[in-house]
C-alpha cells in the first residue's frame, strides 16, 4: 500500500505538471520506485509482477533520458501500468498464478513497416503476433481464429479500423476481445470514436517500442485473470 501511494502521488504530480524539469523529477521518482518493485518481485518469485515492472522500468528509464517523448498517449500508458500493478499486487501473487500466459495477437496496419515495428515490440515482451496489411484479410482471420488482443490502425484503404472493429464485434468469439487503436490521430474526438466503435484503448503514432510493449502486457496479463467470455 505504501508503494502504491507513492506511485500514485508521483503519477498525479506528473500529469499536472507542465514544466519539463518538474516532469523529469516525477518520472525519475517513478523509475526508482518501479526499479525497486522489479527487483523485489524477481527475488520473491513473483513472475507476473516482475515481468510487467521490468518493461515498465524500461519505459520510465527511456522517458528519463528523453523527457520530450512524454505525450498524452504515454501518460495514459503510465497511468494504466500503475493501475494494473495495483491489481497484480492483490491478485497476482499466488503461487499458482506465476506462469506468463501464452497469447495470440493480431496486428492490422496497411503499412508494412508499422506491422513489423509492432510485431518487433511485442516480441521483445515474449509475445508472438500475426500481422496483416489488408483489413478484409484481417476480418477473415478473425472469423476463423480466436485472438486475445488486436492492434488496429485507423486509416486503412477499403475499411477503416473503426469499421473493422465494429465488424469483429459481431463475431461471437470476439465480442469482448481487447482492441487497441494505433493511429497518428491523437485528439480527443478520435479517442471518443474509438470507444464508440468498440475499442478498448488508444496509442498514438509515433510511439516508442516499449510503450506498446507495456500496453500489450497489461492486456495480456489481465486476460489471465479476467478471460473474455
Image (cartoon, rainbow, N blue to C red):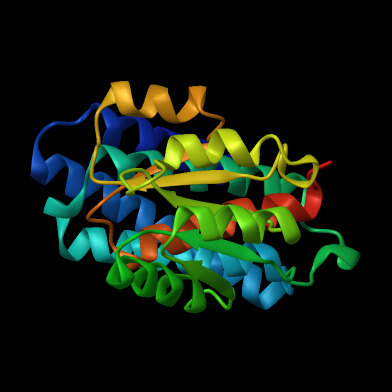
Q: Between 58 and 220, which is closer to the camera in this rendering?
A: 220
- Note whether 75 is above or below 152 in the view shown: above
x, y percent for residue 186? 25, 36
Say if residue 177 shows up in the picture.
yes
Horizontal arrangement in the rendering, residue 18 relative to residue 106 (left or right):
left
Horizontal arrangement in the rendering, residue 220 relative to residue 206 (left or right):
right
The quarter of the picture where the N terminus appears is top right
Q: Which residue: 90% across, 66% down?
A: 96
Q: Between 110 and 37, which is closer to the camera in this rendering?
A: 110
Residue that extends furthest to the right in the rendered view of this protein: 96
Horizontal arrangement in the rendering, residue 138 relative to residue 26 (left or right):
right
x, y percent for residue 188? 29, 23
Quadrant of the rendered structure where residue 210 is?
Answer: bottom left
Q: Between 101 and 152, which is closer to the camera in this rendering?
A: 152
Q: Which residue: 9% across, 36% down?
A: 19
The quarter of the picture where the C terminus appears is top right
Quadrant of the rendered structure where residue 114 is?
Answer: bottom left
Q: Which residue: 28% across, 62% down?
A: 208
Say if residue 35 shows up in the picture.
no
Q: Which residue: 70% across, 35% down?
A: 170
- Note whether 88 is above or below 111 in the view shown: above
Q: Between 122 and 26, which is closer to the camera in this rendering?
A: 122
- Note whether 212 is above or below 41 in the view shown: above
Horizontal arrangement in the rendering, residue 144 relative to residue 165 (left or right):
right
| Number of marks in the rendered image | 0
x, y percent for residue 228? 78, 44
Amino acid at each position: 500500500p505504501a508503494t502504491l501511494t507513492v506511485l500514485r502521488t508521483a503519477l498525479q504530480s506528473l500529469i499536472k505538471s507542465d514544466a519539463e524539469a518538474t516532469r523529469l523529477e516525477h518520472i525519475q521518482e517513478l523509475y526508482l520506485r518501479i526499479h525497486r518493485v522489479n527487483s523485489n518481485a524477481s527475488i520473491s518469485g513473483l513472475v507476473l509482477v516482475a515481468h510487467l515492472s521490468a518493461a515498465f522500468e524500461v519505459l520510465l528509464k527511456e522517458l528519463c533520458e528523453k523527457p520530450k517523448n512524454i505525450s498524452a498517449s504515454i501518460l495514459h500508458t503510465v497511468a494504466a501500468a500503475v493501475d494494473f500493478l495495483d491489481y497484480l499486487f492483490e491478485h497476482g501473487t499466488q503461487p499458482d498464478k506465476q506462469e506468463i500466459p501464452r497469447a495470440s495477437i493480431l496486428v492490422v496496419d496497411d503499412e508494412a513497416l508499422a506491422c513489423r515495428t509492432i510485431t518487433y515490440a511485442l516480441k521483445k515482451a515474449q509475445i508472438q503476433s500475426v500481422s496483416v496489411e489488408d483489413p478484409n484479410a484481417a476480418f477473415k482471420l478473425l472469423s476463423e481464429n480466436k485472438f486475445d488482443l488486436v492492434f488496429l490502425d485507423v486509416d486503412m484503404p477499403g475499411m477503416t479500423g473503426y469499421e473493422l472493429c465494429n465488424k469483429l464485434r459481431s463475431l461471437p468469439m470476439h465480442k469482448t476481445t481487447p482492441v487497441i487503436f494505433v493511429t497518428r490521430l491523437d485528439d480527443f474526438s478520435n479517442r471518443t470514436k474509438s470507444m464508440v466503435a468498440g475499442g478498448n484503448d488508444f496509442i498514438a503514432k509515433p510511439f516508442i517500442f516499449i510503450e506498446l510493449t507495456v500496453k500489450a502486457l497489461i492486456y495480456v496479463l489481465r486476460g489471465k485473470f479476467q478471460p473474455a467470455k
